[in-house]
Amino acid sequence: MDCRFLLKIVKKPNAQEVDAVELQNRKLALSHKILMSVEKPARYIGGEVNAVMKDPDEVEVRFAMCFPDVYEIGMSHLGIQILYDMFNRREDVWCERVYSPWLDMDRVLREEGIPLFTLESQSPVKEMDFLGITLQYEMCYTNILQILDLSGIPLVSGERGEDCPIVIGGGPCAYNPEPIAEFFDLFYIGEGETVYDDLIDLYKKVRDSGEGRRAFLEQAAQIPGIYVPAFYDVEYGEDGTIKAMRPNRPHAPERVVKQLVVDMTKVPYPEKPLVPYLKATQDRVVLEIQRGCIRGCRFCQAGMVYRPVRERDVEDMKEYAVKLLESTGHDEISLSSLSSSDYTRLKELVYFLIERFGERDVNISLPSLRIDAFSLDVMSRVQDVKKSSLTFAPEAGSQRMRDVINKGLTEEVILSGAAEAFRGGWNKVKLYFMLGLPTETREDIEGIAALANEVARVYYETVPKGNRQGRVQVNSSTSFFIPKPFTPLQWAPMFTKEEYLDKARTVNEAMKRQLNHKSLRYNWHEADVSVLEGVLARGDRRVGRGILEAYRRGCLFDSWSECFDNEKWMAAFEAAGVDVAFYNLRERSLDEVLPWDFIDTGVTKEFLKREWKRAMEGTVTPNCRAACQGCGVKKFGGGVCFEDQD
């Protein structure tokens, strides 16, 4: 049973304060007048607690790390914190940060002719040696073009000269880089702790030899995990599908192999993470306890591309937890994992945190935790449990549909978990589902409402009337399923906006018919955003023309509902010749060449095909610890694949 809850443990460590004198002495890129004219000027000044300052004359390589969204969201991202710390441990490298300026600042920079700048040194991004952009969400693609545009860097890689930084893309969306391929000089496929040192060392060597960016890219393409789009040609068939994709340089490999950390104990973890001025989306210390997931949900890209599961040493986690809280002043720590309950030393770690911080006002956030005897014991040891909403993710309303997606949850488990939560004092539950899954029927759709009603029923049957804190609240929300690369459901068709809305209406009407309908609430994701995300997620290089046209028409911050303009996107696609139906509405053949087939994540295509067929049969596949399914990642030589041999 997947759920989230927050444990309140008891005293807040003294927060470090920014040295106001040092901040005042820093030369900012923007005048006081400009800063006071925009919303949240703290987004643009830098100088936060634990920010790394270096002398630009004493470093050899300057790296601008970019999150293409606003400061508050980017500052919540663990990957940026890890890379920032890793790069800045090198004496010859200074890693700085840049985020997408909000609309008001975007306008000011254009009107005043001020180039986009990094936070630490307030230097123009174009003066950096590298611009690394993390690709977390397809709906941020136009923000990537904004970053390049405001920096004075040509949007298309082939138009960049020697005075431009090397533009690198990495992160989950890099597992299908083709829709944005022409905007990047190279992509880093895999985890950042692996070959970045090799890449930076190569850059220094090539630069010192007097060779240019072309020579660097040719040699970089030979580093495992590095993909240089310019060195590959794509050939299309008469039906519009990809006929072949081949390297056009001897330096470029036919397949780019994902790079990953085999032994998590051998890589450093940030002990002094950045502390934002503004309240970030996740304003807390994050402790990554493991990478990967054993569960094998067929819709989940992260569960496939981050295989195999690799745990961090529990003693290291205890030490890091203490250092992180002391160095930041945060009053909350989150144990980060795709499935926290599967961390084999979770009990030991949580009990340590409770005992270690038992006299302090520190919260412990446990995402993706199952409600079981362990979690109840933890709750009983905490005097002041914060009774916020618990989150359950059944993903589908019927057992048949949960078997199709290999969720591994039965209705009995879901309801028993809900009952345990209600006994523990909660009366608010959030349920997450998906609509538009392969083989979905009307019965499956209406099952969402039926399951929500059952959860409410369990509350009234479990909690005596005299002990109830009002009526139970069961809030259900649905997103629309989007097939992602490297998942067993990557071949599945999607639906039109109207069809998605019909599905949502069916759920809404079914909710009103339930016996406990007064306890039920329902909302759904925007259908037009899902349609667009589907095109960007599985698109090929031709989709890049549509992205560029959308940006030119003013599309920006598309992940923000108040900014998203579907009409502009559809007009841009039409002008660029991008057919939404071609990318979304057809079921792909298992033999079709997919845009991302040149990437080797370790999970074989044969395994994904086998799982696709099992999905169509509604057959459940055991998790990695229950039985190895031969997905292919054992070739990396570590993680859960070798636990029995330890």
Image (cartoon, rainbow, N blue to C red):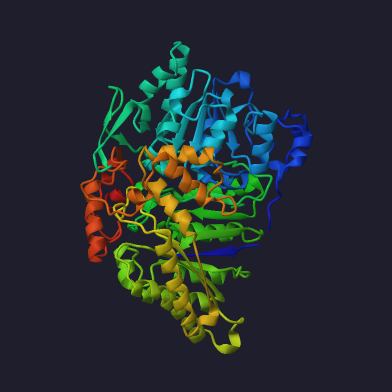
- At x 44% / y 19%, what residue is drawn? 213
Q: Which quadrant would residue 411 be assigned to in this image?
A: bottom left
- At x 43% / y 24%, what residue is drawn? 158
Is residue 566 shown left or right of residue 614?
Answer: right
Instruction: Give whichever of 391, 90 is nearer the camera.
Output: 391
Instruction: Give whichever of 529, 126 is nearer the camera.
Output: 529
Is residue 645 shown left or right of residue 277?
Answer: left
Question: In this orientation, does residue 292 appear?
Answer: no
Residue ranking furthest to the bottom: 465
Say which quadrant the N terminus sits in: bottom left
Position in image of residue 14 (x %, y %): 71, 50
Position in image of residue 544 (x %, y %): 42, 38
Q: Which quadrant would residue 253 be assigned to in this image?
A: top left
Position in image of residue 623 (x %, y %): 30, 59
Q: Is residue 390 above or below residue 471?
A: above
Q: Is residue 432 above or below residue 555?
A: below
